[in-house]
Image (cartoon, rainbow, N blue to C red):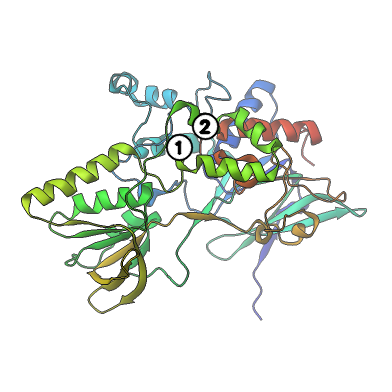
Amino acid sequence: MTTTPTADTSEHRVHDLVGVGFGPSNLSLAIALAERRTAAGDAPDVLFLERQESFGWHPGMLLADATMQISFLKDLVTPRNPASDFSFLSFLHRQGRLHDFINHKTLFPLRAEFHDYLVWCAERVGEQVRYGQQVVELRPVRDGGRITSVDVVARDTAGRQTVERARNVVLAPGLRPRLPEGVHESARVWHSEHLLHRLADLPEEPVRGFAVVGAGQSAAEAVDHLHRTFPRLPVHAVFSRYGYSPSDDTPFANRIFDPEAVDAYYDSPQEFKDELMGYHRNTNYSVVDPDLIAELYRRVYAERVRGETRLRIHNMTRVVALDETDGGVDLTVEDRSTGKQTVLAVDHVVYATGYQPVDVRTLLGGLADHCVFDGLGRPALHRDYRLVTDDTVDCGLYLQGCTEHTHGISSVLLSNVATRAAEILDSIEARTGLTAAAS
């Protein structure tokens, strides 16, 4: 039996904090740490581990004209520290585009531009991050029967393992692409998460067109992009609704993303939490920007005027079969009103069917036995995003993401990352003293 070599660095020092994952949430936390370090004049021992080889935030969906759905003011720092030089406006100033952006008169930058901002921030705190590290296990470290710290086991692309010991761990696992049961990705069947990458790697020019399954923003953006990119091919939009539903971006509804709304949601009984989520799902889930809806309808109508049917909307429709052939994919769809089935012969099928949280219990490993979960397997959390544990746990276990059931809809969005980072740091400092010298 072959064993994997392990370099156990935990014997040499104990980090004040190890962050698992380095997307926008833990990036915001790293910036907050850097700014507190500058203000306080000391340097807590902090390390973030990220499985990707470099920073990236949904790079497969950085479509040329796609814009953000939230204001640039909800960047990584501004709600926490409006004077921060890590703000999106500071980024624009450094790039020489601040006045051009002001003249643009928009709150919603291009998604690609905001990604550039995130990369710019990540590079500035790069000394805190180790990329190419897949965290594979969390091991409790006991002292006299108490769990005082955690060994974070990571594996690099060559299979080498390292172990980093930490007094506090912040898990930011992100979300995983969701596919319908029985559907698996292949050379011809993709999740929208990988759209641009798969298009760039096409082995041959498509000849039969595309089908996009889904009714949300990503689905509409994929339909829009494919329709423009392949001007001679049909694009089939397949969804169960009668039409695309518009997102609610009105001011009162948007207050559901405010920090105060997190307090109200957290303190509410579970029954009312479920009601609130139902009331305001249309701010984020399975909805589309109204301007994009209008643009897609304009194209459908223009094609009808010209006697074309290249952009084909299959509403009130579900997929009942998918068969890959040598020449493409035969996608069988069923009209849910009449029961009539139709086979769409296409080159590729794009499933824009959203994302799902990871199972936190898998990440926690042996620590899961010391954490509290509800009947649905969801972790119980304190208001400060710290996992509820039994009384043998002295170290801090924090969770960014996968907290929608306790902290509300903003938990999986950018809206509150800056405020949440400050709350987590305040909690760690209050409980254990983050600025204490490392062992």
Residue 122: give x, y in percent of width and height. 50, 38
Of the residues under marks 2 and 1, which one precedes in the sequence?
2
Name the residue rendered at 50%, 23% in the picture. 85
Name the residue rendered at 60%, 26% in the picture. 35
Q: Which residue is mark 1?
A: 118
Q: Please say if 73 is above or below 176.
A: above
Name the residue rendered at 50%, 43% in the picture. 281
Q: Nearer the viewer, residue 220 or 12?
A: 220
Name the residue rendered at 53%, 29% in the picture. 255
Left or right: 70 as drawn, with respect to 402: left
Q: Nearer the viewer, residue 18 or 1?
A: 18
| CB-based contact (under 8 Å), mark 2 and mark 1 | yes
Residue 383 in view: yes
Residue 31: give x, y in percent of width and height. 57, 32
Secondary-structure class at tag 1: helix
Q: Which residue is mark 2?
A: 76
Q: Quadrant of residue 318?
A: bottom left
